[in-house]
Image: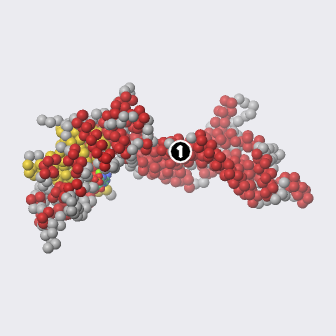
């Protein structure tokens, strides 16, 4: 049996807003095995970062409640103290963020920012300097001495993201979380950074949680895909299953709305409406169906069973609306 | 960097010229002249005119200005009319400048130390009781006139618990450097501490809100993701970033010390430039007033330069420009 680096079971996160707890994500079950890349996709506001942040233990406990079970490399995270989290972060798990410029301290030299990731867990490591240089080499920076002595504003966006990756890798974590790691970069650099993440993942046999909007990136990098909508996973399976045989209306809408999929001469589909805000969410229904105007009201308002349906081995779908859903009906209401 | 500084100093020359004219004219506009307060009621008009003529006070203002500037270039600010009759202004200022500088340095360091500590405590405990207390306290100290606190501290630590001297600077020309150094430290400490304790407000408010802003920045999340404890994130990352926009103000607070010292020096009987200025004002001692205002004007210009140097020193993004 493959080694499970991430096991999330029934994970929910609630934010306290105006003295009232509002659920942002609910009942998330996800697993990442060693050497695998799981892509988490979904529109803005669907709760991807909220989930990733709970794996890092970076939610502010004063106004956030995380429940369920999150195990990283077998260790339970839910309920850890701040001190225990400090020892865990950056060691078992490393994280890469979206905007590499704002994610680096503008007043600190690159070398020192990478070194800090090491020394914070190993105070008197005599090898730090060498280790920093090795890390910079590992992420494809040749002039490691010069770069280590520079400040973030002196580097290009691609270089900065390489530095962020070096920081995430500093203690050779088993699990790497990348939250939209290339969104802030231009296309060419994007491809290079993705290549780098792939290389490193292969070399270290690490598990990766890759959060992205870009389905191209998913097909290129991921082994498995989970599709998130309004705080819940609506479909998950292998890349082939999701791309070749998508079931849930949301997955199919996302694929149809993907600019890479549009055929010449065809108009790009855009999903009507927006993701509901926390106050509007209903976790017993399939809230995406609100955005399919041609569906029957009965289907839209049907209660959704808690368990996802396994439509083929390893391929899970939430609810049953997918059975009634078809893009051929788009114009039905209008006729 | 050196080039930049030289260039900035050169730019300052015309500014200094402008400031000097401005100050000279201000002095001219002040009502009365030193002889009015200083004469016995029986002296006749002719005597007064003779004295005014001897001092050049009957010349047109621009001639007086040129005379004054030429003298200033020779280090001659004239002699005091009332405060220290007949003594060269440069000598009086020379004697009094070091006590003010030393007290100013101590006061500035302490002010920033107190303000920073309070802002850190506040920001780390946002909206908790201690935070609310510090906000109220700082608002209060800035609302109440500072001399009220100076009197309270004076009474408390000079008379009720007599641990500090009631007046003097502790400087004695006949003594060696170390005796003077510690003697002055002992005399300057209470006024400096008092100034610092009750003037934290602006730095505190600004730094507190910067700290809160910086807390939400992405680099903070990165540091946390490395496993850095929150208190170390504050110490190593947030504080410096939050302090950045304030650092430029340090230059001005150092050179602005003269104004701040007026009340404190007078209340604590600490004979520095601030107290001198108060005396000169009440005695209409024009030569001293203009000399001090000129000094303050030039200092302010240097404060700007000093601020820029400090900013460049703490912010690498400015450094490389
Ligand atoms: N700290 C917070 N306090 C209150 N609400 C929050 C907080 N963080 C996220 N939310 C809300 O939770 C929902 C999910 O947000 P999240 O950032 O996880 O979405 P996302 O899928 O990562 O979106 P994006 O693609 O834009 O990054 C949103 O409605 C957001 O407003
Ligand atoms: Mg996000």
Q: Is residue B137 left or right of residue B226?
A: right
Name the one closer to the observer, A203 or B22: A203
The spot of residue A107 in percent (x, y) is 45, 42
Count the numbered circles shown: 1
Q: Looking at this view, is A108 or B27 the one in front?
A: A108
Q: Give the image quarter of residue A329.
A: bottom left
Q: Say if A272 sits above or below B188 in the image.
A: below
Across and down, in percent, residue A56 comes to 28, 42
Residue at 70% across, 40% down: B168
Residue at 32% from the left image edge and 45% from the top image edge: A189
Q: Give the side of residue A124 with respect to residue B199, left or right.
A: left
Image coords of residue A211 (percent x, y): 25, 48
Residue A212 horizontal/vertical position (percent)? 26, 49
Residue at 74 percent across and 55 percent down: it is B24
Residue A286 in view: yes
Position of the C terminus of chain A by quadrant: bottom left
Q: Which residue is mark 1?
A: B311
Residue with the most extreme top position? A126
Subunit of mark 1?
A: B
Q: Quadrant of residue B155?
A: top right
Left or right side of B102 for A291: left
Which one is nearer the viewer's eye here, B32 or B152? B32
Badge 1 density bin: few <14, some 14–19, many ≥20, Cα 10 Å: many
Q: Residue at x 16, y 72 (%)?
A: A334
């Amino acid at each position: 049996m493959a080694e499970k680096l991430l096991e999330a079971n029934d994970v929910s996160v609630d934010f306290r807003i105006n003295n009232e707890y509002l659920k942002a994500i609910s009942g998330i079950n996800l697993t990442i095995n060693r050497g695998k890349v799981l892509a988490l996709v979904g529109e803005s506001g669907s709760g991807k970062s909220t989930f990733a942040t709970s794996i890092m233990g970076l939610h502010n406990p004063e106004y956030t409640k995380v429940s369920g079970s999150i195990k990283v490399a077998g260790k339970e995270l839910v309920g850890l103290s701040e001190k225990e989290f400090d020892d865990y972060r950056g060691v078992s798990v490393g994280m890469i963020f979206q905007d590499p410029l704002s994610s680096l301290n503008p007043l600190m030299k690159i070398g020192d920012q990478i070194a800090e990731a090491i020394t914070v867990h190993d105070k008197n490591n005599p090898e730090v300097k060498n280790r920093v240089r090795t890390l910079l080499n590992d992420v494809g920076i040749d002039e490691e001495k010069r770069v280590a002595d520079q400040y973030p504003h002196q580097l290009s966006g691609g270089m900065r993201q390489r530095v962020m990756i070096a920081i995430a890798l500093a203690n050779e974590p088993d699990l790497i979380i990348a939250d939209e790691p290339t969104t802030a970069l231009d296309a060419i650099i994007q491809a290079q950074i993705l290549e780098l993440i792939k290389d490193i993942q292969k070399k270290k046999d690490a598990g990766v949680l890759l959060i992205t909007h870009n389905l191209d990136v998913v097909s290129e990098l991921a082994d498995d895909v989970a599709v998130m909508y309004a705080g819940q996973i609506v479909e998950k399976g292998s890349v082939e299953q999701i791309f070749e045989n998508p079931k849930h209306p949301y997955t199919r809408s996302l694929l149809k709305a993907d600019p890479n999929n549009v055929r010449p001469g065809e108009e790009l589909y855009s999903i009507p409406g927006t993701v509901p805000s926390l106050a509007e969410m209903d976790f017993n229904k399939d809230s995406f169906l609100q955005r399919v105007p041609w569906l029957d009201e009965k289907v839209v308002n049907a209660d959704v069973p808690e368990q996802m349906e396994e439509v083929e081995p390893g391929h899970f779908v939430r609810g049953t609306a997918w059975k009634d859903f078809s893009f051929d009906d788009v114009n039905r209401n209008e006729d | 960097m050196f080039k930049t500084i030289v260039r900035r100093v050169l730019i300052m020359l015309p500014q200094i010229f402008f400031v000097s004219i401005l100050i000279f004219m201000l002095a001219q506009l002040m009502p009365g002249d030193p002889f009015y307060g200083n004469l016995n009621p029986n002296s006749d008009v002719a005597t007064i005119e003779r004295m005014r003529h001897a001092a050049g006070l009957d010349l047109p203002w621009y001639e007086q200005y040129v005379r004054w500037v030429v003298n200033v270039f020779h280090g001659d600010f004239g002699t005091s009319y009332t405060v220290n009759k007949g003594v060269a202004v440069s000598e009086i200022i020379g004697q009094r400048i070091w006590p003010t500088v030393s007290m100013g340095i101590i006061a500035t360091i302490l002010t920033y130390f107190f303000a920073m500590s309070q802002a850190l405590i506040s920001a780390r405990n946002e909206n908790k009781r201690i935070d609310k207390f510090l906000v109220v306290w700082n608002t209060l100290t800035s609302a109440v006139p500072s001399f009220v606190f100076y009197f309270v501290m004076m009474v408390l630590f000079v008379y009720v618990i007599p641990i500090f001297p009631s007046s003097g600077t502790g400087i004695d020309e006949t003594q060696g450097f170390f005796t003077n150094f510690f003697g002055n430290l002992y005399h300057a400490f209470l006024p400096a501490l008092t100034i610092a304790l009750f003037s934290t407000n602006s730095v505190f408010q600004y730094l507190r809100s910067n700290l809160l802003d910086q807390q939400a920045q992405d680099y903070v999340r990165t540091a946390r993701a490395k496993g850095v404890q929150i208190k170390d994130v504050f110490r190593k990352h947030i504080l410096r970033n939050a302090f950045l926009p304030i650092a430029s103000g340090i230059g001005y607070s150092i050179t602005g010390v003269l104004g701040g010292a007026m009340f404190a020096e007078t209340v604590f009987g600490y004979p520095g430039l601030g107290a001198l200025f108060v005396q000169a004002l009440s005695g209409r001692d024009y030569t001293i007033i203009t000399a001090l205002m000129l000094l303050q004007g030039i200092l302010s210009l240097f404060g700007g330069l000093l601020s820029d140097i400090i900013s460049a020193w703490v912010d690498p993004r400015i450094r490389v420009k």
